[in-house]
Image (cartoon, helix red, strand yellow):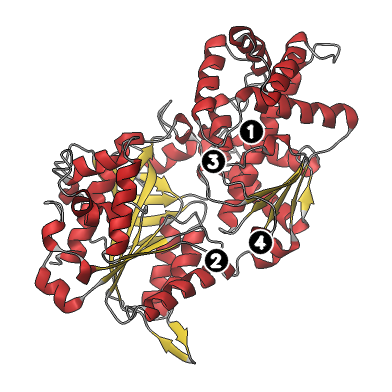
């Protein structure tokens, strides 16, 4: 019988499954060595997958610089110096003398225990653990390239490596300067890249907060790799017993939701109609209070102009002014203490003045006076954490042996997503969420339509969204399958199906919220993984994200403040 040849997409999906099985096994086991047998299995699977975000991962000499910057913005500063990395739960280190290290683009507390060990808090569920393990695996792959590029055919350190040691020593001790052109030349050899590539990477690393220089990172990755190769000082990743016991039990999500409901009760807001929004913590606040706070700022004549003024690099003092005004006029902010790293804003709409809103925001003053709805804005969740937090938030509030139901009228999800046919800043309006790799799918009736977002200079797509297991484990073959197959997916993200799973359970099965709850999903494109140079590793949206963010915010608020 003739065997059917597997497609590249099928091979990639198999590699993703192998990675997840390996990571789950190692998590249960408690520890592993990245270059041991188990670690090598993860490396082989990641190299077989060739994720877009990790670029030239399979090139034997070229170090992937965009990928390295991407992961180091999401890993604690100094992790490249640590031989031992331990993933922990919330275990009391926040009350210790250790100063938390918070990565530039991932909210998690990390602690440098000593010169060789880093502890990293994992309180956002399995997705967070899988995410960091793939980043670490990629880091070790690139470290091996640096070691190989730093040694000659006899296994001796090259002159460029010895010069790099001197440069890093001067950099650390802030001694006299060094000739940067010469330094870039040495570094380009060790990275297997051109001089121009190296110069560009140095500039990008230097501009990123909480990330060490590329000289420093290259030296320490190569140094630890050499020590493991020649001195048998193995690197190791481990998981605390508390983390293994707590994962999957909603420990942090339950505490987070209870804190919100307790606050609502204390403020006498719990019995009001409630509208939940999952979004950033600036667009709703700025849209409701920005005009009044800035009191006719000359550049703020429309909502978009207001948003661009506040989003500009020099807008920090204005943003602070808006926040202070909002806190005095009906907004409450609950900074997270539960470990979820999801802060919450609560808006009492009866305190919003109609004459202080931007012209784009419509309000029915009589309706607001009568119904007095409350808006809860929760910051972005991460992957599976979306299910945990939404599931707990929609449960009845337990108070004095009573279960108090919550009158949730609408739930709006505004998120960033990868688009499969379009560009950064375009908008996606889904009609279903499909879990990658399994048969679970969640069709729903979206209160938003494609048509209402058209005519604003942005490309707008409608159709199914794929909820992926991790953005760092995707490649073009998988993307093309989702786009070209009968799924006809428009984009991919990590939370949609998790949110919808919790919402359907609460509204259809548990009956803890109304089965008529209104759902509004809209995403704006943060990247196009099918186009070279437009992946997540290519950089942030910047000002390109302002227009779609505030357009979606405008549509959400108008539905709440002036319902049909």
Q: Nearer the viewer, residue 102 or 564?
A: 102
Q: CA distance from mark 4 to mark 1?
A: 40 Å
Q: Nearer the viewer, mark 3 or mark 1?
A: 3
Q: CA distance from mark 3 to mark 4?
A: 33 Å
Q: Quick one: label 3 or label 1, which is nearer the N terminus?
A: 1
Residue named by callout 1: 47
Residue 66 in percent (x, y) is at 53, 27
Disc 4 residue crowd, few under 14, some 14–19, many 20+, Cα 10 Å: few
Q: Nearer the viewer, mark 2 or mark 4?
A: 4
Left or right side of 58 for 365: left
Q: Quick one: label 2 or label 4, which is nearer the N terminus?
A: 4
Q: Is residue 375 above or below residue 547?
A: below
Q: Are marks 4 and 1 in contact (CB under 8 Å)?
A: no
Q: Quick one: label 3 or label 4, which is nearer the N terminus?
A: 4
Q: Nearer the viewer, mark 4 or mark 1?
A: 4
Residue named by callout 3: 472
Q: Secondary structure at mark 1?
A: helix
Q: Nearer the viewer, residue 355 or 220?
A: 355
What residue is at 38 percent from the left and 80 percent from the top?
A: 265
Residue named by callout 2: 338
Disc 3 residue crowd, few under 14, some 14–19, many 20+, Cα 10 Å: many
Count of marks, rendered view: 4
Q: Nearer the viewer, mark 3 or mark 4?
A: 4
Left or right side of 547 for 183: right
Q: Is residue 242 above or below residue 476?
A: below
Q: Is residue 242 above or below residue 395?
A: above
Q: CA distance from mark 3 to mark 2?
A: 27 Å
Q: Secondary structure at mark 2?
A: loop
Q: Quick one: label 1 or label 2, which is nearer the N terminus?
A: 1
Quadrant of residue 270 within the rendered picture: bottom left
């Amino acid at each position: 019988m003739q065997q059917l040849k597997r497609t590249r997409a099928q091979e990639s999906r198999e590699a993703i499954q192998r990675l997840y099985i390996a990571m789950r096994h190692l998590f249960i086991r408690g520890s592993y060595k990245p270059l041991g047998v188990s670690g090598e299995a993860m490396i082989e699977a990641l190299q077989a997958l060739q994720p877009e975000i990790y670029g030239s991962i399979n090139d034997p000499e070229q170090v992937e610089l965009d990928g390295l910057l991407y992961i180091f913005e999401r890993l604690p500063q100094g992790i490249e110096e640590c031989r031992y990395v331990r993933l922990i739960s919330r275990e009391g280190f926040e009350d210790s003398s250790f100063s938390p290290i918070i990565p530039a683009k991932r909210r998690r507390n990390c602690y440098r225990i000593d010169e060789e060990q880093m502890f990293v808090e994992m309180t956002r569920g399995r997705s967070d653990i899988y995410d960091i393990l793939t980043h670490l695996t990629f880091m070790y792959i690139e470290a091996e390239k640096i070691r190989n590029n730093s040694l000659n055919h006899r296994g001796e350190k090259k002159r460029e490596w010895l010069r790099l040691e001197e440069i890093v020593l001067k950099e650390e001790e802030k001694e006299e300067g060094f000739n940067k052109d010469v330094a870039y030349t040495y570094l380009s050899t060790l990275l297997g890249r051109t001089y121009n590539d190296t110069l560009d990477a140095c500039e990008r690393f230097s501009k990123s907060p909480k990330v060490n220089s590329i000289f420093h990172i290259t030296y320490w990755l190569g140094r630890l790799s050499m020590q493991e190769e020649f001195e048998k000082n193995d690197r190791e990743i481990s998981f605390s017993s508390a983390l293994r016991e707590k994962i999957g039990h909603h420990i942090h999500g339950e505490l987070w939701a209870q804190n919100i409901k307790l606050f609502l009760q204390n403020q006498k807001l719990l019995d009001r109609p409630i509208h939940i929004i999952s979004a950033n913590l600036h667009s709703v606040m700025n849209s409701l209070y920005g005009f009044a706070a800035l009191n006719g700022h000359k550049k703020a004549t429309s909502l978009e102009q207001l948003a661009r003024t506040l989003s500009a690099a020099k807008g920090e003092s204005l943003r602070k002014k808006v926040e202070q005004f909002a806190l005095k006029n009906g907004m409450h902010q609950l900074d997270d203490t539960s470990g979820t790293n999801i802060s919450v804003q609560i808006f009492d709409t009866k305190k919003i003045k109609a004459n202080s809103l931007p012209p784009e925001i419509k309000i029915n003053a009589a309706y607001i006076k009568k119904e007095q709805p409350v808006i809860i804005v929760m910051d972005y969740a991460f992957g599976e954490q979306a299910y945990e937090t939404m599931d707990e938030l929609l449960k009845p509030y337990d108070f004095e042996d009573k279960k108090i139901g919550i009158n949730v009228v609408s739930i709006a999800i505004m998120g960033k997503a990868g688009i499969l046919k379009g560009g950064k800043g375009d908008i996606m309006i889904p009609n279903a969420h499909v879990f990658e790799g399994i048969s679970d799918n969640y069709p729903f009736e979206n209160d938003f339509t494609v048509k209402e977002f058209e005519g604003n200079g942005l490309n707008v797509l409608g159709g199914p969204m794929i909820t992926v297991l991790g953005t760092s484990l995707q490649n073009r073959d998988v993307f093309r399958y989702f786009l070209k197959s009968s799924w006809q997916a428009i984009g991919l993200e990590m939370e949609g199906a998790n949110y919808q799973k919790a919402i359907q359970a609460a509204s259809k099965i548990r009956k803890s919220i109304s089965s008529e709850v209104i759902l509004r999903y809209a995403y704006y494109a943060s990247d196009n993984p099918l186009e070279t140079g437009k992946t997540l590793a290519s950089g942030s949206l910047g000002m390109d994200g302002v227009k779609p963010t505030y357009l979606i915010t405008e549509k959400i608020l108008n539905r709440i403040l002036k319902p049909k």
